[in-house]
Image (tube, rainbow, N blue to C red):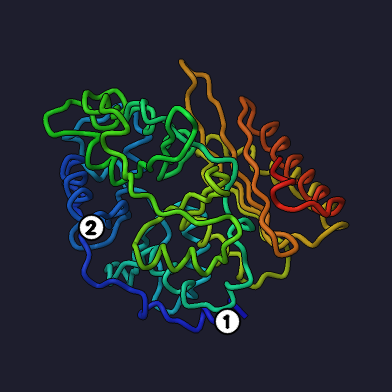
Amino acid sequence: MLKSQIDAISVKDVAVSDFPTLDSEDTLSDSLALMRKTGYQEIPVLEGGAYVGMMRYSTILRKKSASPDAKVKTFVSGLPVVSEDMEITKIAEYMVTNNCRQLAIVNGKKVTGIVFRTALIEIAARMKSLKDVKVWEIMTTPVDYVKDTDVLATAIEDMRRLDIRTVPVVNGAGKLVGVVGMKEVIDNGWKAGERSIGGISKSPSANILVDSIATTAVLTVDWGDDLEKAVNIMAEKNISTLPVMDGDDMVGILTEFDIIEMISACRERDQLYVQISGLEDDDKIYADAMYSDIAAAMSRISKIYKPESLSIHVTRYNEGGDKRKYSLIGKLFVDGRTINAKEIGWDLVDTNNNLIKKISDSVINIKDSNLSFRKRKK
């Protein structure tokens, strides 16, 4: 029912026709200034008026060193494009796969509009069927956070390492006091005149204390709230992240990305939908082994509950020198619930295996236990 309601809405209904663009000859400094001015984190890049790709802020974050004068054309990302007849659930799938907020609507070689992730959230806010879904069923847990005494560089490194856009801020007692998002990073992470953009975490402006720039008027939801309430808050207040509370304790985080994943999971598929995103080109040789291990685990899980979709996002970062470390975040939709797991390790295939084992163990716990959510969390 949710899929039919969502896909009854056309791309034209959610398209934005007034949007910024960059020329391929523009510089990174130009792109940052435009992102800061417009709030866009992905901006279409044109060459002679023709679409060639998107300039993404996340691409800049991953670069260890880049000159402000470097040309945009060397950093363009080949994100998938949206057609005017595409289903909304398919657009959601693209956004999940590529962890992006904006996608270009392209007709031939011309960009005719932009679809925002927020527009899909507004669609979800109108779906009354979300009343039956609870926040705890799709929230992400455990929560990554920074301390109010940390500097901006720490928040930036966490965002880069985990490929996330917003980080909660806690005080010395571990209580939520604010959030730092990509807007604060864009506004404060690099200043004109500094020599490096990509090495943003080492720039002078990155020494700003987190508590001096964090948003402190934080809206939250309770873990037992209906998802409809949370989605309406996101849509009405135009925010992407809601910390999830159990009393005074932060027990999870609900983001627009979680909602988009749910919309993507609504797509009709003959088989279990498995999605691995974020693999670097030289890591794709391990994809077959990862999918093989996933298939074996899902076969075992299907004897307990029928899995609906599984998404795994991979982030690779350097832990000093040439040593690569991997952070994997997995989300399985099964039996009307969402199971989250996170794993970090040096070997990609082994880390994936450990992640799948965590997810499998959680499915077994659901079957064998009648405990409440609070007890399961303990």
Which residue appears farthest toward the front when viewing the image? 247
Image quadrant assignment for residue 110: bottom left
Quarter of the C terminus within the rendering: top right
The residue nearer to you, when weighing 186 against 26, is 186
Horizontal arrangement in the rendering, residue 161 relative to residue 211 (left or right): right
Q: Is residue 76 above or below residue 307?
A: above
Horizontal arrangement in the rendering, residue 62 relative to residue 352 (left or right): left
Q: Which residue is drawn at 45% across and 81% down?
A: 9
Q: Name the residue under label 1.
A: 4
Residue 328 screen position, x and y as percent: 59, 39
CA gap, disc 2 and disc 1: 35 Å
Q: Residue at x 47, y 33 (%)?
A: 161
The residue nearer to you, when weighing 127 against 40, is 127
Q: Which residue is drawn at 17% across and 52% down?
A: 37
Mark whose residue sits in front, 2 or 1: 1
Decide: few, some or many residues near mark 2? Use Cα within 10 Å; few <14, some 14-19, many ≥20. many
Quarter of the N terminus within the rendering: bottom right
What amino acid is at disc 2? Leu
Q: Mark 2 points at which residue?
A: 46
The residue nearer to you, when weighing 131 against 109, is 131
Horizontal arrangement in the rendering, residue 100 relative to residue 6 (left or right): left
